[in-house]
């Protein structure tokens, strides 16, 4: 229940973190949500059987063919080539799907998500034992966050009802699909699905969706067999020993083949001279201050801001650096890896984009923002193409430094597709830990 939304809701109310989650959907957003829910009901009315089911996507990127998830779509394509039927369920971003989507056999999962939130607010029976647990937890969290215990208790009761509603929806869908395995992204928004998998004895695996291991509450909560996945799949060998909140021996390397393909396609292309600034919605204020200092002190250098989708609302207010003459906002329609071609370097805090830029042999400047979580990547400053970018002088030194490109065979952040591991998981066999194929 804590994972679902309590801490996020209360930290936002207290103004401590994640201001990008504030704000109402508005009339147009509410209409999109309502229409999407109705369309989803029709979409989910007749769901075929499939041997593998996917729930959610971590990072949609635009390509010439449409929107793809660079880390999960190749896995689905591989399993299809192996003769396995697949089905994917997608939750929308702020009520809207990114279309056209390339993902095959895609079903919109709007209705169960919206219905679960509605169910959370409708009165329904909660057992005396659950009421006891909620009351104890409400007191603990109310004291910690200085909130009235009664309000906390109401919130937790809503979360429990919402969880049970989505679990019922997932059970119905899984009964139709009858998959051999389920792959999810973001366990904390799919706990109902994972619980349904557990009830039906279907193995479930969570894809790494970003470089967030060991730095957030989402992965540091105690392991719970009822709502946690059977295993966790990383981008590469570099991430195998990070903290993903699962027991030892349940973290496997699935690889990230799309980024290898994309890098090979761009290897012979000349690189541009811009510097890419990476936005992160939970750090907008601190990032903007750093960007203003760097860009205003390097007037001859051209910068482009790579905008996170959740930062596009009130963009100019969040990032006043865009008012500087040498800073522009990157096009929402330009794919990330295409944007790399215009740049010689990337600057940011701890975004996945920094690791991808490193893999594309760009120079990577690492900030150290006041009040932000410590960036573990800064330990790599001095290795390969990682540099300190805490101020304009250091950024200038980075640009003038001799190129120290990563080895072309990779850096451990992203590995080729680990096909044998994936097939063993789907077939309910345990792979050798950390093995590469």
Image (tube, rainbow, N blue to C red):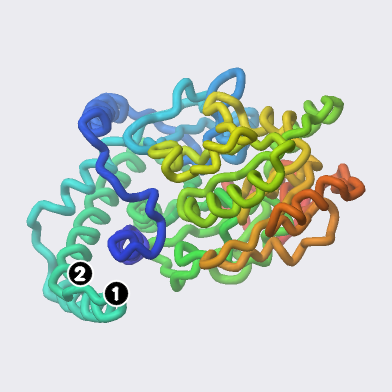
Q: Whole-percent x and y of residue 110?
A: 30, 36
Q: Whole-percent x and y of residue 432?
A: 71, 60
Q: Tag 2's secondary structure?
A: helix
Nearer the viewer's eye, disc 2 or disc 1? 1
In three-dimensional space, the C-alpha distance between marks 2 and 1, rounded to whole angstroms, equals 10 Å
Q: Is residue 15 visible?
A: yes
Q: Whole-percent x and y of residue 216?
A: 50, 64
Where residue 252 sits, quadrant-wise, is bottom right
Q: Residue at x 45, y 23 (%)?
A: 99
Nearer-N-terminus badge (2/1): 1
Q: Is residue 319 left or right of residue 159?
A: right
Q: Residue at x 86, y 26 (%)?
A: 268
Indicate which disc residue 411 carries: none
Can you name the residue that lies furthest to the right here? 402
Compared to residue 300, the image places residue 402 above or below, namely below
Q: Is residue 217 left or right of residue 153?
A: right
Q: How many marks?
A: 2
Q: Are marks 2 and 1 in contact (CB under 8 Å)?
A: yes
Q: Residues within 10 Å of mark 2 (few under 14, many from 20)?
A: many
Q: Residue at x 84, y 26 (%)?
A: 270
- Location of the N terminus (image quadrant): bottom left
Viewer-side residue, 217 vs 201: 217
Where residue 41 sits, quadrant-wise, is top left
Query: Mark 2 — residue?
Result: 152
Query: Mark 1 — residue?
Result: 145
Q: Whole-percent x and y of residue 284?
A: 48, 51
Viewer-side residue, 291 vs 96: 291
Viewer-side residue, 202 vs 157: 157
């Amino acid at each position: 229940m804590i994972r679902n939304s309590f801490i996020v809701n209360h930290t936002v109310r207290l103004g401590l973190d994640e201001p990008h989650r504030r704000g109402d959907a508005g009339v147009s957003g509410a209409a999109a949500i309502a229409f999407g829910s109705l369309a989803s009901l029709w979409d989910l009315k007749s769901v075929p059987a499939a041997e593998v089911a996917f729930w959610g996507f971590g990072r949609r990127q635009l390509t010439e063919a449409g929107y793809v998830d660079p880390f999960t779509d190749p896995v689905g394509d591989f399993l299809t080539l192996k003769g396995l039927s697949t089905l994917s369920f997608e939750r929308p971003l702020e009520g809207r799907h990114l279309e056209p989507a390339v993902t095959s056999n895609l079903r919109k999962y709007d209705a169960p998500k919206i219905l679960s939130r509605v169910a959370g607010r409708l009165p329904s029976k909660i057992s005396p034992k659950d009421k006891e647990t909620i009351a104890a937890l409400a007191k603990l969290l109310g004291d910690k966050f200085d909130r009235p215990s009664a309000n906390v208790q109401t919130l937790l009761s809503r979360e429990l009802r919402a969880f049970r509603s989505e679990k019922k929806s997932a059970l119905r869908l899984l009964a139709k699909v009858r998959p051999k395995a389920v792959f999810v992204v973001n366990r904390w928004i799919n706990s109902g699905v994972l619980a349904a998998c557990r009830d039906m004895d279907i193995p479930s695996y969570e894809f790494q969706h970003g470089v967030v291991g060991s730095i957030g509450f989402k992965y540091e909560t105690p392991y719970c067999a009822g709502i946690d996945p059977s295993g966790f799949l990383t981008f590469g060998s570099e991430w195998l020993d990070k903290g993903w909140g699962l027991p030892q021996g349940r973290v496997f390397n699935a690889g990230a083949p799309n980024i290898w393909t994309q890098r090979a396609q761009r290897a012979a292309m000349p690189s541009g001279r811009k510097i890419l600034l990476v936005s992160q919605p939970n750090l907008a204020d601190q990032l903007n201050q750093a960007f203003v200092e760097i860009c205003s002190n390097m007037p001859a250098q051209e910068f482009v801001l790579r905008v996170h989708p959740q930062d596009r609302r009130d963009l100019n207010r969040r990032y006043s650096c865009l008012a500087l003459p040498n800073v522009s906002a990157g096009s929402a329609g330009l794919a990330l890896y295409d944007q790399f071609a215009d740049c010689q370097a990337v600057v940011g805090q701890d975004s996945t984009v920094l690791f991808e830029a490193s893999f594309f042999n760009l120079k990577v400047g690492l900030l150290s923002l006041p009040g932000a979580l410590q960036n573990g990547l800064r330990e790599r400053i001095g290795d390969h193409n990682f540099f300190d970018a805490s101020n304009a002088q250091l950024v200038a030194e980075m640009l003038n430094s001799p190129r120290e490109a990563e080895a072309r065979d990779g850096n451990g952040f992203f590995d080729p597709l680990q096909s044998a591991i994936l097939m063993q998981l789907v077939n309910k066999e345990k792979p050798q830990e950390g093995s590469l194929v």
